[in-house]
Image (tube, rainbow, N blue to C red):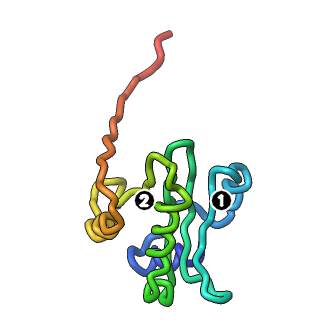
Amino acid sequence: MTLVKNALWEKYQLQPTHTPEEMMLLAGRFPDEIKLFTVHKDKTMLGGAIIYESSQVAHAQYSAAGKEGKASGALDLLWSYLITDYYAKKKYFDFGISTEKESRYLNTGLSENKERYGARTVVYDFYEWDVGEAPR
């Protein structure tokens, strides 16, 4: 999570949605559905991603690479492996959202990066329904 935290702060001045402790708790409760994949050179972690799995979808929740990982294309290698090998039988590989500010702003750079891997954009609609008070 340190790579993710540093990358999010450096680029967007944002914190990850989950703390490392929360991710450990979630992964402990759902060991078959939440997996960490990493790319290493010798003993140095170059990059990685946390993937949430369901029967049809592999969803990337967090991904990041350090300076050496970016220079060496560590995430390119990881995405290629995950999409073409590890999750080849899944119906969907979801890179996650490309929006900010409660989905009010499209991060075009992030979206374009995902499209370079063959992804396409899907718009999620949000609805709010005021049901008022329950009848008495």
Q: Nearer the viewer, residue 35 or 13?
A: 35
- Helix, strand or loop for disc 1: helix
Which mark's residue is nearer the viewer, 1 or 2?
2
Q: Quadrant of the N terminus?
A: bottom right
Q: Which residue does the image show at 55% across and 83% down from the upper left?
A: 46
Q: Nearer the viewer, residue 136 or 54?
A: 54
Residue 100 to residue 73: above or below: above
Residue 135 to residue 126: above or below: above
Q: CA distance from mark 1 to mark 2?
A: 21 Å
Where residue 64 appears, as percent x and y from the top left, is 49, 74
- Helix, strand or loop for disc 2: loop
Of the image marks 1 and 2, the number of the one nearer the N terminus:
1
Q: Is residue 33 left or right of residue 64?
A: right
Residue 51 to residue 73: above or below: above
Q: Nearer the viewer, residue 18 or 116?
A: 116
Amino acid beneath label 1: Glu
Where residue 12 appears, as percent x and y from the top left, is 39, 74
Amino acid beneath label 2: Phe
Q: Which residue does the image show at 63% across and 55% down from the upper left?
A: 34
Mark 2 highlights which residue?
Answer: 95
- Do the numbered discs 1 and 2 sit on residues whose CB atoms are within 8 Å? no
Q: Is residue 128 left or right of residue 135?
A: left
Residue occupying the far right of the picture: 28
Q: Which residue does the image show at 50% across and 9% down from the upper left?
A: 136
Where residue 10 appears, as percent x and y from the top left, is 43, 81
Q: Which residue does the image show at 64% across and 67% down from the upper left?
A: 20
- Residue 22 - label: 1
Where residue 54 appears, as percent x and y from the top left, is 56, 45
